[in-house]
Amino acid sequence: MSSNQSARWVVKQKMQTTEQQQVTALILAGGRGSRMGGQDKGLTPLLGKPMIEFILEQIAPQVDHVVINANRNLDEYQRYGHPVISDSLNDYQGPLAGFAAGLEHSPTELMITLPCDGPTLPHRLVSKLLEALQSDDADIAVAHDGKRLQPVYALMKRSLLPSLHEFLANGDRKIDLWYPKHKMVTADFSEVAKSFNNVNTPEQQAEEEARLSHQPLNREKESV
Protein backbone atom coordinates (compact mmCIF):
# COMPACT_ATOMS: atom_id res chain seq x y z
CA MET A 1 0.00 0.00 0.00
CA SER A 2 1.43 3.38 -1.01
CA SER A 3 1.77 6.24 1.45
CA ASN A 4 -1.08 8.09 -0.30
CA GLN A 5 -3.31 5.01 -0.14
CA SER A 6 -2.42 4.54 3.50
CA ALA A 7 -3.31 8.14 4.31
CA ARG A 8 -6.65 7.80 2.49
CA TRP A 9 -7.38 4.58 4.41
CA VAL A 10 -6.72 6.32 7.75
CA VAL A 11 -9.00 9.24 6.80
CA LYS A 12 -11.71 6.80 5.67
CA GLN A 13 -11.49 4.83 8.92
CA LYS A 14 -11.73 8.04 10.99
CA MET A 15 -14.76 9.16 8.97
CA GLN A 16 -16.44 5.80 9.55
CA THR A 17 -15.73 6.01 13.26
CA THR A 18 -17.24 9.49 13.39
CA GLU A 19 -20.32 8.37 11.49
CA GLN A 20 -20.84 5.27 13.63
CA GLN A 21 -20.38 6.88 17.05
CA GLN A 22 -23.75 7.31 18.72
CA VAL A 23 -24.56 10.47 20.64
CA THR A 24 -27.27 11.44 23.14
CA ALA A 25 -28.41 15.06 23.36
CA LEU A 26 -29.19 16.48 26.79
CA ILE A 27 -31.35 19.62 26.69
CA LEU A 28 -30.86 21.59 29.89
CA ALA A 29 -34.23 22.95 31.03
CA GLY A 30 -33.77 22.66 34.77
CA GLY A 31 -32.92 26.23 35.76
CA ARG A 32 -34.77 28.81 37.83
CA GLY A 33 -35.24 31.29 34.99
CA SER A 34 -34.54 34.09 37.47
CA ARG A 35 -33.86 36.78 34.87
CA MET A 36 -37.07 35.79 33.08
CA GLY A 37 -39.15 36.41 36.20
CA GLY A 38 -39.02 32.77 37.24
CA GLN A 39 -40.42 31.48 33.94
CA ASP A 40 -39.55 27.98 32.83
CA LYS A 41 -37.45 29.05 29.86
CA GLY A 42 -37.88 25.88 27.87
CA LEU A 43 -41.62 26.51 27.81
CA THR A 44 -41.35 30.26 27.25
CA PRO A 45 -43.03 31.16 23.95
CA LEU A 46 -40.99 32.40 21.01
CA LEU A 47 -42.84 33.23 17.81
CA GLY A 48 -45.85 31.43 19.22
CA LYS A 49 -44.29 28.15 20.36
CA PRO A 50 -42.22 26.97 23.34
CA MET A 51 -38.50 27.54 22.92
CA ILE A 52 -37.68 23.89 23.47
CA GLU A 53 -39.54 23.02 20.28
CA PHE A 54 -37.06 25.05 18.23
CA ILE A 55 -34.22 23.09 19.80
CA LEU A 56 -35.83 19.68 19.41
CA GLU A 57 -36.46 20.31 15.71
CA GLN A 58 -32.79 21.11 15.11
CA ILE A 59 -30.97 18.71 17.42
CA ALA A 60 -33.01 15.54 16.85
CA PRO A 61 -31.68 14.96 13.29
CA GLN A 62 -28.11 15.28 14.57
CA VAL A 63 -28.22 12.67 17.35
CA ASP A 64 -29.42 9.16 18.16
CA HIS A 65 -31.24 9.94 21.41
CA VAL A 66 -32.65 13.02 23.15
CA VAL A 67 -33.09 13.48 26.91
CA ILE A 68 -34.65 16.52 28.58
CA ASN A 69 -33.38 17.68 31.96
CA ALA A 70 -36.17 19.49 33.84
CA ASN A 71 -36.99 20.18 37.48
CA ARG A 72 -40.59 21.37 37.09
CA ASN A 73 -43.47 21.10 34.62
CA LEU A 74 -42.41 17.53 33.95
CA ASP A 75 -45.74 16.60 32.35
CA GLU A 76 -45.35 19.42 29.83
CA TYR A 77 -41.92 18.20 28.79
CA GLN A 78 -42.96 14.54 28.67
CA ARG A 79 -45.45 15.28 25.92
CA TYR A 80 -42.54 15.67 23.50
CA GLY A 81 -41.94 11.93 23.68
CA HIS A 82 -38.39 11.96 25.05
CA PRO A 83 -37.19 10.83 28.49
CA VAL A 84 -37.41 13.61 31.09
CA ILE A 85 -35.00 13.48 34.02
CA SER A 86 -34.51 15.73 37.04
CA ASP A 87 -31.40 16.69 38.98
CA SER A 88 -30.51 14.39 41.85
CA LEU A 89 -29.39 17.52 43.72
CA ASN A 90 -32.10 19.74 45.15
CA ASP A 91 -32.67 23.48 44.83
CA TYR A 92 -31.43 24.22 41.30
CA GLN A 93 -27.71 23.58 41.62
CA GLY A 94 -26.79 24.71 38.11
CA PRO A 95 -25.88 23.11 34.79
CA LEU A 96 -23.35 20.67 36.21
CA ALA A 97 -26.15 19.04 38.22
CA GLY A 98 -27.98 18.64 34.93
CA PHE A 99 -24.82 17.22 33.30
CA ALA A 100 -24.61 14.61 36.06
CA ALA A 101 -28.25 13.60 35.67
CA GLY A 102 -27.75 13.33 31.92
CA LEU A 103 -24.62 11.19 32.17
CA GLU A 104 -26.39 8.94 34.67
CA HIS A 105 -29.16 8.26 32.16
CA SER A 106 -27.34 8.54 28.82
CA PRO A 107 -27.78 5.35 26.76
CA THR A 108 -24.63 6.19 24.78
CA GLU A 109 -21.00 6.76 25.69
CA LEU A 110 -21.09 10.29 24.26
CA MET A 111 -23.47 13.04 25.34
CA ILE A 112 -23.87 16.55 24.01
CA THR A 113 -25.30 19.25 26.25
CA LEU A 114 -27.20 22.33 25.12
CA PRO A 115 -29.38 24.91 26.85
CA CYS A 116 -33.13 25.25 26.45
CA ASP A 117 -32.85 29.01 25.84
CA GLY A 118 -30.81 28.94 22.64
CA PRO A 119 -33.38 28.62 19.83
CA THR A 120 -30.90 28.33 16.95
CA LEU A 121 -28.18 25.73 16.48
CA PRO A 122 -25.40 25.21 13.94
CA HIS A 123 -26.35 22.53 11.42
CA ARG A 124 -23.14 20.62 12.19
CA LEU A 125 -22.98 21.23 15.92
CA VAL A 126 -22.66 17.55 16.82
CA SER A 127 -20.42 16.44 13.97
CA LYS A 128 -17.91 19.26 14.44
CA LEU A 129 -17.68 18.67 18.18
CA LEU A 130 -17.30 14.94 17.55
CA GLU A 131 -14.53 15.52 15.01
CA ALA A 132 -12.68 17.74 17.50
CA LEU A 133 -13.09 15.22 20.31
CA GLN A 134 -11.86 12.29 18.27
CA SER A 135 -9.04 14.07 16.48
CA ASP A 136 -7.35 14.91 19.80
CA ASP A 137 -8.61 11.87 21.73
CA ALA A 138 -10.12 14.32 24.21
CA ASP A 139 -12.67 13.86 27.00
CA ILE A 140 -14.68 17.02 26.33
CA ALA A 141 -15.17 19.17 23.21
CA VAL A 142 -16.67 22.63 23.68
CA ALA A 143 -18.03 25.09 21.13
CA HIS A 144 -16.21 28.41 20.66
CA ASP A 145 -17.92 31.27 18.83
CA GLY A 146 -14.69 33.08 17.92
CA LYS A 147 -14.85 35.44 20.88
CA ARG A 148 -15.70 33.23 23.82
CA LEU A 149 -16.24 29.69 24.90
CA GLN A 150 -19.83 28.44 24.91
CA PRO A 151 -19.46 26.05 27.86
CA VAL A 152 -22.94 24.53 27.89
CA TYR A 153 -22.59 23.45 24.25
CA ALA A 154 -20.30 20.54 24.98
CA LEU A 155 -19.74 16.95 23.91
CA MET A 156 -18.40 14.69 26.65
CA LYS A 157 -17.74 11.09 27.53
CA ARG A 158 -20.02 9.21 29.90
CA SER A 159 -16.92 7.87 31.66
CA LEU A 160 -16.48 11.34 33.24
CA LEU A 161 -19.45 10.73 35.56
CA PRO A 162 -17.40 9.59 38.61
CA SER A 163 -15.25 12.72 38.32
CA LEU A 164 -18.33 14.91 38.14
CA HIS A 165 -19.94 13.18 41.11
CA GLU A 166 -16.80 13.80 43.16
CA PHE A 167 -16.62 17.43 42.05
CA LEU A 168 -20.24 18.08 43.04
CA ALA A 169 -19.88 16.18 46.31
CA ASN A 170 -17.09 18.58 47.24
CA GLY A 171 -19.51 21.48 46.86
CA ASP A 172 -18.11 22.76 43.56
CA ARG A 173 -20.53 23.98 40.91
CA LYS A 174 -18.52 25.93 38.32
CA ILE A 175 -18.11 24.48 34.85
CA ASP A 176 -14.87 26.40 34.25
CA LEU A 177 -13.30 24.63 37.24
CA TRP A 178 -14.40 21.12 36.25
CA TYR A 179 -13.50 21.18 32.56
CA PRO A 180 -9.75 21.78 33.14
CA LYS A 181 -9.58 18.57 35.17
CA HIS A 182 -9.92 16.70 31.89
CA LYS A 183 -8.53 16.82 28.38
CA MET A 184 -10.64 19.48 26.70
CA VAL A 185 -10.60 20.75 23.12
CA THR A 186 -12.62 23.42 21.35
CA ALA A 187 -14.41 23.49 18.01
CA ASP A 188 -14.54 26.74 16.03
CA PHE A 189 -18.02 28.04 15.21
CA SER A 190 -16.99 31.64 14.61
CA GLU A 191 -18.66 31.66 11.18
CA VAL A 192 -22.06 31.06 12.81
CA ALA A 193 -21.59 32.85 16.12
CA LYS A 194 -25.18 34.10 16.16
CA SER A 195 -26.34 30.50 16.40
CA PHE A 196 -25.43 30.72 20.08
CA ASN A 197 -27.73 33.65 20.85
CA ASN A 198 -29.74 32.85 23.94
CA VAL A 199 -32.76 34.26 25.73
CA ASN A 200 -32.15 35.16 29.36
CA THR A 201 -34.33 38.27 29.69
CA PRO A 202 -37.63 39.57 28.27
CA GLU A 203 -35.57 42.08 26.26
CA GLN A 204 -33.53 39.29 24.68
CA GLN A 205 -36.74 37.39 24.01
CA ALA A 206 -38.08 40.34 22.00
CA GLU A 207 -34.74 40.76 20.17
CA GLU A 208 -34.58 37.09 19.24
CA GLU A 209 -38.17 37.06 18.03
CA ALA A 210 -37.39 40.03 15.79
CA ARG A 211 -34.26 38.33 14.44
CA LEU A 212 -35.94 35.01 13.77
CA SER A 213 -38.98 36.58 12.16
CA HIS A 214 -36.64 37.97 9.47
CA GLN A 215 -34.39 34.90 9.30
CA PRO A 216 -36.23 31.56 9.28
CA LEU A 217 -34.46 28.71 11.02
CA ASN A 218 -32.04 26.57 9.01
CA ARG A 219 -31.61 29.21 6.30
CA GLU A 220 -28.48 30.74 7.70
CA LYS A 221 -25.65 30.03 5.29
CA GLU A 222 -22.98 28.05 7.03
CA SER A 223 -20.24 25.69 6.06
CA VAL A 224 -19.59 24.44 9.59
Image (cartoon, helix red, strand yellow):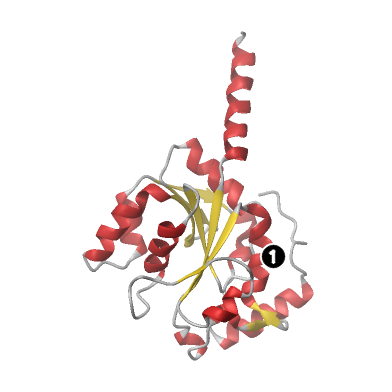
Q: Is residue 48 left or right of residue 86?
A: right
Compare residues 209 and 96 and report the one nearer the observer.
96
Q: Is residue 194 above or below residue 126?
A: below
Judging by the rendered image, the residue that carries numbered circle 1 is 57
Q: Is residue 171 left or right of residue 5?
A: left
Compare residues 197 and 170 and report the one nearer the observer.
170
Residue at 24% across, 65% down: 169
Q: Check disc 1: other Cα within 10 Å, few if <14, some if 14-19, many if 20+.
A: some
Q: Is residue 200 visible?
A: no
- Quadrant for the N terminus in the image: top right
> Under tag 1, what secondary structure?
helix
Q: Is residue 189 above or below residue 18?
A: below
Q: Is residue 173 above or below residue 202?
A: above
Q: Which quadrant of the view contains residue 131?
A: top right
- Residue 216 position, x and y percent, is 77, 69
Instruction: Residue at the far bottom: name it.
Output: 37
Q: Which quadrant of the view contains residue 146?
A: bottom right
Which amino acid type is shown beneath numbered disc 1? Glu
Q: Is residue 180 left or right of residue 152?
A: left
Residue at 67% across, 70% down: 54
- Residue 189 position, x and y percent, is 59, 54
